[in-house]
Amino acid sequence: MTLSITFGGKDLSELVDGFTAITRNVGTGWSNTYQDAIVGQPGQNFLYNSLQVKTISIEYKINGWSRRFAKVREQMAHLLSVTKPVELIFADEPNKVWYAVPDGNQTLTEDYNTGVATGVLTFAVPSGYAESKTFARVLDSNPAGAKGIVTADGNSHYKITLQNDGSLDAYPIIRIKHNSENGYIGVVNANGTLELGKRAEADTEAYKKSEILFDYRNSIEDGFNKAQKNVGIFNDTSQKLNSALGIDRAWGRPHIALSGNHAQTAGGNAGSITWEIPTDSNGEKGALNEYLWWRQIVWAGLASQVGFMKISFTGENGEFLYGVETFKRKTGLDCEYNFLASNGKGGYRIIDPASHNFQITDSIYHNPFDATRGWSDLLRRDDMVQVYWWGSYPQFHVPEIKGKKTTKIHVCIGALGNKGQITHLYLDQIYYRKDFVSAIRDIPNRFPMGSTVEIDFGKGQISTDGLVSNRDLVTGSEFFSIPKGKSELDLYFSDRVKKPPSIEILWKECLL
């Protein structure tokens, strides 16, 4: 018989001069288990059966004399020396692979009268069955192939009809490439259930964030143009809003300043700007938790110059809540920096008075608001206000403002009567931030977009992007087989999957 037979990738037909008989039998041996016989009842009840080890024998011949017989004996022994089952393939069934080991004595009888040696090779197949050499394959990109039909029920459920043409159940390999984030994979058929991840894994979470609601750090002129003029509300009414503010360009940069032709009536004469705090990303207006940063310059050209700058936070009813003032009241170098807060009775109080005074010179050692610096900030957490002062951050408890939301920020710059105004009294930069704004953000899911999960049911192994990840297996899951013939399999994913995954199911058919 001219037939190619390979074992472990080596062609046996190259060693011999023909195969004279092959015994593969029908199927394999079945071992049946019965219930013990019951006295007085005929026969026994069948319980179950199992496949036995399959035996395959191959009879062959070799033409020649002793030298050739010896050489073939040696070559054949070398080829058969394996420590585990390897592929045994017959050319008349090229898609059928038996994983076999030599079993018992491998005979060779040498007849020197005829110059013909005959022998028998005996192989055992421990599994009792063969596997198809090629994979049966089902793809979502080919939803109606010969081996299966894939039907999508949205992005989170796929019903798959499989056609297993083998003689036995088969263990599949399922590959899933995620085209969007996913937190859960469920695989179900008549033989079992397997789950990975969390079925109800959250895709988002609530958190608190900060939002900058206006920012004029690099655009103070824009901030000036957008502000309302001379409608400011401050700690008191000692200043009349009867003058104009404008843009000064000392040192080659823009500043908001009091105009040179301001009113000179008795008392404070000032101009003001007001910014209404914009709504946050939730459409909510006002804040209990906030932060204001600004840069102010305060530098007198003469000791006789006087004036002030106030920054004020007001509430929903237009009431003064808190703020700061920079105030030079008299001739000399002394200038005050005061933290002001509501007294709850329509007035105000100076908190920690006389502790934040400075000298209004151009010295960096005497004046925190010289031309090269001037940065300040206020931080509020409901009834606590933190005031920056020359590298320190004192905090003050103001019970009168608890629960009262800030809705507007006001700034005024003024002079006193007809006295000389402060040469450099400017607002250079400012921005406002609202803190603890409620928001929702995405949570990275267990299986990110672009990741590939492979479930090998035969090996009992799960991998994600090539790395073993059996830790994702839900307790109680099992690696199951797909039945022979026609069957259904369901794949489930998180409800929030935005794009359908790429699905591949493959298996080697088990053949008797």
Image (cartoon, grey):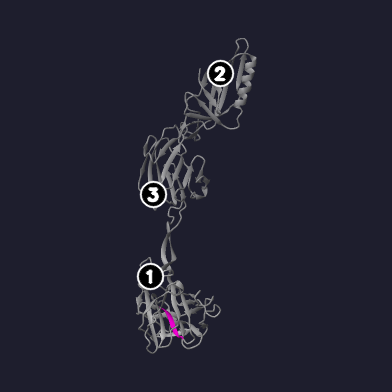
Query: Depth-wise, is mark 1 or mark 2 nearer the camera?
Result: 1
91 versus 282 height, above or below: above
Which amino acid type is shown beneath numbered disc 1?
A: Asp
Asked if residue 136 is among those painted magenta in the image, a careful observer would answer no
Q: Quote the CA–CA distance across marks 1 and 3.
A: 44 Å
* Secondary structure found at label 2: strand
Which amino acid type is shown beneath numbered disc 2?
A: Tyr
Q: Do the residues labelled 1 and 2 touch (CB within 8 Å)?
A: no
Q: In which quarter of the image is residue 164?
A: top left
Residue of label 3: 499
Q: Quote the CA–CA distance across marks 2 and 3.
A: 59 Å
Query: Depth-wise, is mark 1 or mark 3 nearer the camera?
Result: 1
Q: Earlier in the sequence, mark 1 or mark 2?
A: 2
* Front residue (pair 274, 449): 274
Residue 444 at x, y = what percent? 46, 55
* For residue 439, side relative to residue 67 (left or right): left
Q: How crowded is mark 2: few (under 14 residues within 10 Å), some or many (20 or more)?
A: many
For image coordinates 52% across by 21% down, the residue present is 22
* Front residue (pair 349, 20): 349
Residue of label 2: 60
Residue of label 1: 222
* Front residue (pair 25, 256): 256
Q: Which of marks 2 and 3 is nearer the N terminus?
A: 2
